[in-house]
Amino acid sequence: MKTKMKTAALAALGAAAAAAIYLSPFGATAQNSMMMMAGVSDQVWDAFGGNQQAQKYSTATQITPENVKDLKRAWSIHTGDVSSGERSTTWGATPLFVNDTVYVGTPWYRIFAVEPDTGKTKWVYAAGGADGPPEGQGLKSRGVAYWAAALPEAGKPCQKMVYVGTQLGELHGVDADTGKKCAGFGNNGVVNVDAWSTKNKKFKLGLIQPPAVYKDTLILGWAGLDWVYKTENPGTVFGIDARTGALKWTFNIIPPDMENVTGTANVWASISVDPETGLAFLPTSSPSPNYYGGDRLKEMPYATATVAVKAETGEVVWSRQLVHHDIWDVDTNSAPTLLDIKKDGQVIPALIQATKMGYHFVLNRNTGEPVWPIEERPYPASDVPGEVAAKTQPYVPYPEPTIPDTTPPVSKFADIVSFGQCSRWKARLRDEGRYTPPSIRGSISWPATLGGVEWGGGAVDPTTNTYVVNSNRVPQIYTLVPRADADKLYGKNARGPGGYSAQEGSAYGFKLENFLNMWGMPCWVPPYGTLHSYDMNTGKQLWTKPFGQVQKWGFYMPESWGSITIGAPVITKSGLIFIGASMDSRVRAIDLKSGEVLWKHIVDAPAVSQPAVYTYKGKQYVVFAVGGNGILTPRLADQLVAFSL
Amino acid sequence: MTQPHSTRGAWLIVLASLITIAICVYDYYTPETGLIGSGGLIFVAGAAVLMLLASLAMAKVPNRPAWVQTFLVVSILLDIIGTAVCGYFLESPVIMSAQALALLGWIINVISNATERSVETDEVEDED
């Protein structure tokens, strides 16, 4: 009703002017097992995805759908690590709760260790490197990783460690109790991971995403700049000794004979691990340059794929490519969520790989075979000289994708107030739905690089296999600019106005534009962001709703429009979803059964992270890192805020 | 030609304008409001300043030409409606409440003015 009123009012306006000792179905991680044996009752959240299986699930039950309306801010701190402009910060960290401490990494590459019930700072470690990377891609962090020795040596430091990476390619390891560097880790506490990248070096490895942890091995990917150059650092994943920082293994995503014509396809998102089998699941990204593949036509099966490797050796066990010959920059951008599916009387060890295409690849995590059929469907050919788009692409009809197959129609409202700009623009573009190749005249990419599902991925209740995920509905405009024209228009600059990136060394520069009218309004019909719930035993979608609210110049748009959404949900056993991830700087509690918003609270900026849920001294807390992201709004922040009853 | 006009209700509009300006300043600088630094607040604050000036004129200058009275009454009403709509989309109950107060003042003023003009007309007729 309120939404209808708001929609009506808008028309009028226009006319007028992790889990605790959480009991995963696969058994606990080493540190959880130790805590259980020690009889510790506090519920921990010790990895980016709540646990190494990326389930984002808490067994906590104190906060319920009935009492969540009474949730209040327990504490809030500001780290001071926020900046705009050239060195703009993007903070998507999941706070960790383990070792009776909340740990969080900041975009200035500091670790804050704070008391879980008061927010009082215990110690701060500064890794340095916040002066900005030479490539000027801003300062980004998705937090820290935690490791504990299975058999700690009494009286020795660094039996429990916290790791933070920097945009300069350094991985720092510090003692979890004191915040002091661990002298035995790398060179006095620092591993220069960037030094391991020697081929086609165009940038320093950005260690934005904290490593995954399996026993005494850290599994580490990195972020780069795959839209700027044709040939650049080839994607490599590193296995690192958690105690010493020594390199144990590398896994190369780009085939050796392709390294001179492409690069990246790196793993920049989080990685999940099956503690029972010791398999690590790597979500790989697209090769460089992102939007023109004429120089890299040979198949690269590990690019834009999910690859299962042995966590202790890096040996590939299986892989499944999710997009063939990726020329849309639809990187695999979140860790697969692990769960055991009960289907036809059998228990299938499975994973759910959410993607920017809005698909959920549900695979047997031991073999890579699909749980439900995946089709290969034909898609349009490229009309760009030199480019050969893949003839077919995987299509996942089930579970139902989070976005439809065709581009949403033009919004009449946005079109009218822009005097027909939206419809005129769309008529000039190539638009053939999913996998429309980039073109010289301009193509509507649907879905585009903004997704679909973004880098948080989904959450699952492993006791019921109820799965929840937030998803974008955002078409973007992809235009290839022939090199001679690009050089004339933008000179030799790597990046330029209007979303230009050079794709230096290839036959085409590239322009990425948002499909907005002259007033900055989306040219397509809402919703812009949605939240979905699935029963993953059957694959059936239980409900879907617009999620979040657009906020522009302070004005909140109707809830039925939803919001572009970056960040991820978490689920609690009591039947609640906690999520930030909306443009409107609010965090929300949502009823898992119905999808109804039960509670919301304003924070300093959009929380583009996933929250952590923990219980400490008998009290349940939900804590958000609130940092914002320039993709959503210019509003950035440095707030770590906890809520409790 | 100037005529005396009612000042009743004008001070309520002044008060509503001041409340609106105050809440805009507070929201603009307070992160917890969700409106920090937003352009919409500047727009509303600007409208409130105009409303303040108009209502002060209404309160302090009772003798004014009829066209000025008409202009003030119409512009204040449009300002109240526009600001209330903005308050709705800013999800600010304070701004919307202030506009309700302003509207009350506006109604009092319009009715008082009509009543006084009616009495004056009667008096003139009596003198005849």
Image (cartoon, coloured by chain):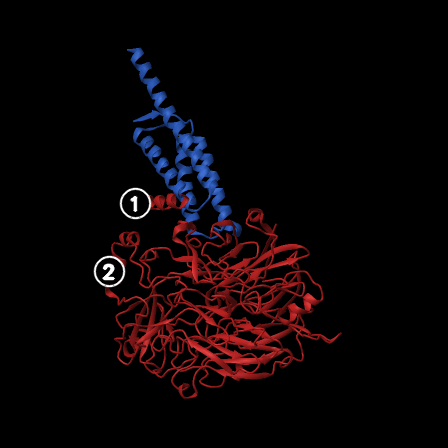
Chain colours: A red, B blue
Res B62 visible: no
* Quadrant (top left, top right, bottom left, bottom right) of the N terminus of chain A: top left
Residue hosting label 2: A424
Q: Relative to B17, is A324 on the left or the right?
A: left
Q: Which residue is mark 1?
A: A15
Find residue B15 and name its label. none
Secondary-structure class at tag 2 = helix
Q: Please tell me whether residue B125 is drawn above or below residue A172 in the rendered image.
A: above
- Residue A374, how many percent across, how many down? 38, 71
Q: Is residue A414 above or below residue B60?
A: below
CA–CA distance between discs 2 and 1?
Answer: 22 Å
Query: Where in the figure is residue A463, as x and y percent of width and height?
Result: 55, 61
Q: Label 2 sits on what residue type? A: Arg
**B52 above or below A535?**
above
Amino acid found under the numbered disc labelled 1: Ala
The picture places residue A191, in percent across and down from the top left corner, at 59, 80
Among all residues in the image, which is located at the extreme right?
A155
Name the outermost residue toward the bottom: A257
Q: Give a yes or no on whether discs 2 and 1 share a subunit.
A: yes
Secondary element under disc 1, as helix, strand or loop, is: helix
Q: Earlier in the sequence, mark 2 or mark 1?
A: 1
Q: Nearer the viewer, residue A115 or A576?
A: A576
* Rendered residue at 59%/75% (across/down): A214
**Chain letter belonging to callout 1:** A
